[in-house]
Amino acid sequence: MPKLALYVPLKAKPGKERDVADFLTSALPLVQAEAGTLTWYAIEEGPGAYAIFDTFDTEEDRQAHLDGKVAAALMEKAEELFSEPPQIHKFTLLAAK
């Protein structure tokens, strides 16, 4: 079972919803190249509301992801796509099925 997770809620700027969805979809190949990222989900929570949820076995794996290409691209596009800066929430997973 993965031990650690990240949750990153994202709020699209008005009119940028499709761009956010496209950006998240395009990030998948980058994440697939990260051996330490066990699961990665791009989520549409509702109109204009998106999120990323991913899991890791170790803090080193989680930090490698945060230092990786997806996080860099997310921060690079933040002002253009999001109405507020992405907030990265770190969690410890207690149970999973």
Image: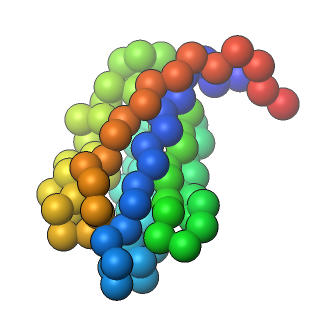
Residue at screen point 84% across, 30% down: 97
Residue at screen point 22% across, 59% down: 78
Residue at screen point 27% across, 69% down: 81
Choose between 79 and 57: the one closer to the eye.
79
Q: On the picture, is 91 further left or further right than 14? A: right
Using the rendered view, name the quadrant where residue 23 is placed: bottom left
Using the rendered view, name the quadrant where residue 43 is placed: bottom right
Residue at screen point 55% across, 73% down: 47
Which quadrant of the figure contains the N terminus? top right
Choose between 95 and 18: the one closer to the eye.
18
Q: Residue furthest right?
A: 97
Choose between 13 and 66: the one closer to the eye.
13
* Model colouring: rainbow
Residue 73, visible in the rendered structure:
no
- In the image, residue 52 above or below residue 80: above
Query: Tag count in the figure?
Result: 0
Q: On the picture, is 55 further left or further right than 97? A: left
x and y, in percent, of residue 16 in the image: 33, 79
Residue 88, visible in the rendered structure:
yes
Q: On the picture, is 67 further left or further right than 76? A: right
x and y, in percent, of residue 12 in the image: 37, 68
x and y, in percent, of residue 83 in the image: 28, 62
x and y, in percent, of residue 25 in the image: 46, 70
